[in-house]
Image (tube, rainbow, N blue to C red):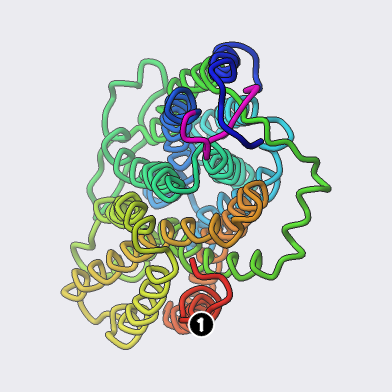
Amino acid sequence: MSGMATQTDVVESAKAASSGTWLEQWEPENAEFWRKTGSAIAWKTLTITTTTLVLSFATWFMMSAIVVRLPSIGFKYDTMQLFWLAAMPGLAGGTLRILHTFLIPIFGSRHVITVATLLKLFPCLGIGLAVMNPDTPFWVFMLLAFAAGFGGGDFSSYMPSTSIFFPKRLQGTALGIQAGIGNFGVSVAQFVTPWIISTAALSTFFGGPQTFVKDGKTSQIWLQNAAFCYIPLLLIMGVVAWIFIRSVPVKASFKEQLDIFGNKHTWFCTITYIMTFGSFSGFAATFPLLINTVYGKFPEAPDPLKYAFLGPLIGSTFRVIAGPISDKYGGAILTHIVGIGLIVLSLVMVFGGLLTPTSSEQFPDFVIVMLLIFLLTGVGNASTFRQYPIIFSHSPRQAAGVIGWTAAVAAYGPFIFSLLIGWTIKHTGSAKPFFLSIVVFYLAATAINWWYYTRKGCEKPS
């Protein structure tokens, strides 16, 4: 749609916003429409979807916090099995994001976000029940860990939805806010878990404690609280989403949306987002187990959950901060800086001996380097999502589709990182081969970003 909005248009749009599912008019690039009607609707929608996205990420990553406690309450799973449990939400999240990529133009924001929010009740209930029984079969836990990926799939609906609600000049900011605050859900899962499992406040409703054993000392914990605590919040936000969210009339069939795959830039954008969000989500899922595996052998070993939440917290914070910066200076140059930084830090991890420590004194340096990696991935998450609407500026619908698709593929990060890190540790005794391999990938992704989007005279400056 184009042209200036009339007063009648504005009134009709306001009516559509309060009843029914589909907005009758949506012209975010129309300054008059945006000022009188569009801005209020868009920011209200962003507030609701961002809140539900926090819960999506929290439930997606709750297994990464739960899994490090399982051996200490009687579960007989070996190291590789624990890495598999950390990996399964990533496998589901990536696969479901492929599906979510195409849902918004078919069903609209209201239906997709409401249903997606309520679906996460199943893994929360199932995992909460499973951790109360140390005899729970491994295959059951694998199934429930896969179901936790429902939260990971949502992102590829939420971000395309947000991109069509806002004008191009605000998309970097809006997408940065939503993705950045949404990413805080990872830290919520890893920060809240140690606290909430140590309290009996919920035991009246959620069952009795388990005996936690560490260094010969015993205590009581309620590990089921780490999953059950999200149930009331999901119910509330599911109802709020249905009542207040409306859908932008940008419709397309599944077949029509496949046109993004004929564009080479879809694949280049996928590679750069794997570098940024794939690394963020992959390291977020494996950070607790990596700490436990590499530094858990020393006396007075660090508690992984006291440190693991800091990485996603820093990455999420800098994703929010980098959104407006990307709007002002462009996303491509920030992505290029991020790529170089990730290469350097990964090499420091390998050649600085931080993955093959001789004492726990190296642990602070290990944490610092990992936190810097998270910081850079957070910046890169914002800068890449600023680039994509510009690269596909000829078609907002295609831009939304590319955002959903790249997010889908990058969501395999937890699955790929968990399995490969677990495999290299099992077969080589160290995660060094993994970090050396990822340096090669970072080099390729950074070169693509430089050639097509950053250098002077590039094909798609963004």
Q: Which residues are magenta?
A: 23-32
Q: Is residue 31 magenta?
A: yes
Picture residue at 33% right of the left edge, 49% below the top: 320
The extreme bottom residue here reads: 351
| 10 Å crowding of disc 1: few (<14), some (14-19), many (20+) | some
The image shows residue 255 at horizontal and vertical percentages of 83, 48
The image shows residue 222 at horizontal and vertical percentages of 35, 32
Q: Main secondary structure of the magenta part?
A: loop
Comparing 108 with 277, the one in front is: 108
The image shows residue 174 at horizontal and vertical percentages of 42, 43
Q: Is residue 70 left or right of residue 123?
A: left
Comparing 420 with 49, the one in front is: 49
Q: Is residue 104 left or right of residue 194?
A: right
Q: Residue 307 sits in which quadrant?
A: bottom left
**Figure disc tally:** 1
Picture residue at 47% right of the left edge, 39% below the top: 59
Q: Is residue 41 left or right of residue 298?
A: right
Would you say residue 238 is visible in this rendering?
A: yes
Q: Look at label 1 and name its amino acid.
A: Ala
* As drawn, 360 above or below 120: below
Q: Is residue 312 magenta?
A: no
The image shows residue 323 at horizontal and vertical percentages of 37, 53
Would you say residue 66 is visible in this rendering?
A: no
Q: Residue 154 sits in which quadrant?
A: top right
Q: Which residue is mark 1?
A: 447
Comparing 233 with 237, the one in front is: 237
Comparing 166 with 307, the one in front is: 166
Picture residue at 54% right of the left edge, 71% below the top: 420
* As drawn, 315 above or below 49: below
